[in-house]
Amino acid sequence: MPSYKLSPDATRKPGPIVAGDPSERGTDRLLLGHSAEAGPFREVWLDVSGEQVIAAFGKRGTGKSYTLGVLMEGLSAGCGDSRIAHLETPRGALVLDIMDIFWTSTLALGDEGPPQIKKQFAVMKKRGFSSMPLNVDVWVPAGYERPDIDPPGVNPLFISPADLSLDDWGSLFDVDIFTEPRGMLIADAVQHVSTDGYTRTDGTQAVGFATFTFAELLDCLNTDADILRNYQDTTLRSIRQRMTSYAALPLFTGSGTPLGNVIQAFRTAVLMLGRVPDALKRVIVAVLLRQILRIRRDVSFAQKRIDLDASLSQAERHSLEAFVSSGLPRTWVLMDEAHVLVGTGQSSVASAAIVKYAKEGRNYGLSLGVATQQPSALDQSLLSQVETVISHQLTAPQDAAVAAKGMRSPAPTQIQIDGETADVDGVLRRLSQGEALFSCGNAPSLQRSCVIAVRPRITAHGGYEA
Ligand SMILES: Nc1ncnc2c1ncn2[C@@H]1O[C@H](COP(=O)(O)OP(=O)(O)OP(=O)(O)O)[C@@H](O)[C@H]1O
Ligand SMILES: [Mg+2]
């Protein structure tokens, strides 16, 4: 590993480096690793007392998914103190796992078992860590379970069709809802079954219900007198056909899984999305993020009334408290390969929901952690929300430029790598696997970006080639 000597000192005071909260509260912290620079041993902690947006960059195989896994492990370590985290505030986490590599956190490392476990155990043990069980639950969109290969205990996630926005419907059917006849047909059908109701060709009436099913949408497409009059047969046929295949998906049956069952305080839900077709993946991500934002917006509003409104009666206070506890805890959303869902120039329902979540979420107790191998391909409006950057090795000039420009701490005034003068680009090119340049805009005592070695994982890392 190269030897790094950077000036000035990373912080004015010696001891652990703790960064991530503008007020340096330190009530909630995750162990990221230690300083990889010349000098005394210093742990590096991410202060997660407040909400934030954090990004891990790095070219293939340099440690991004591993680092995201380190964050996830810390968030799943439970209330109180452990070797990898100190957590007081109830928070949940949701991993939107498009590669299906994070479920492995349910597996402890040990010196017995398959060779891969023993290998990862040896790395962990050499660096003085031990494994512990974490609070991780695994979910998969209903219908995409694979009992023949899945580990036990995978939970099916259901989504209510009523939670889809018109844009989601457009995305699902790959049509423009506002300009294409097929899109307008879907919009009309949704409007009729959810709100207006409709008259069937046999003269019977159907009443609109906010919580509707695919079966009701199909009934509307088959029998709604207005719709049958206003749309051509080819348009009707094509939408009915696709509606029928979506109606058959277990994902959309029933009333939708309450998010409170999925996201729970001091626990992480890993949602495996690898098997789900892209169009559906985008809609699921959009629906979930919008729901989280909506629920947390209301919960934090109610919490502020409890905190600030001295005129509340006892009964009002109790009812607000009940509302808060029936909502969602503060939440971290973690996403690997983020450029896939929120890439430059993409205007998908998922990217819109992710950007909105990143922009507005902090006010409502919502944090975001993303990883990408191509920071230059990440949506600008998401990048601009990032306060903490953990950049592993980057060699492509356009990506290194984005990472170097995006450093959130002042640059070091002097850098030497193996005794030779270098610049930030030089550091980014030289970093070894698991090392990263760490910078944070919310760290008053951090005087500059610093080179860190990310700690070993204490549960199985699933991001290797198999
Ligand atoms: N902090 C670390 N400590 C020990 N080993 C690490 C560390 N970071 C990464 N590694 C090793 O590097 C390998 C690749 O890491 P990782 O899966 O995170 O790569 P990646 O950057 O996500 O790559 P890809 O772009 O291919 O997804 C891991 O399987 C692990 O063996
Ligand atoms: Mg990866």
Image (cartoon, grey):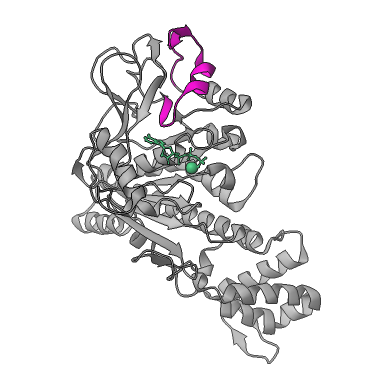
- The answer to whether residue 433 is above or below residue 92 is above
Asked whether, in this view, residue 313 is left or right of residue 405, the answer is: left
Which picture quadrant has residue 68?
Answer: top left
Q: Nearer the viewer, residue 32 or 433?
A: 433
| Residue at (25, 46) in percent of width and height | 77
Between 12 and 140, the one lying in front of the other is 140
Residue appearing at x 55%, y 21% in the figure: 405
Where residue 284 appears, x then y in whole percent?
52, 59
Residue at the spot 59% in from the left edge and 28% down from the top edge:
399
Residue 385 horizontal/vertical position (percent): 50, 33
- x and y, in percent, of residue 86 in the image: 23, 38
- Say if the magenta span includes residue 215: no
Is residue 161 in sight in this rendering?
Answer: yes
Q: Nearer the viewer, residue 117 or 421?
A: 117
In this view, 239 is above or below 175: below
Q: Which residues are magenta?
A: 409-437
Residue 145 rendering spot, x and y as whole percentages? 46, 68
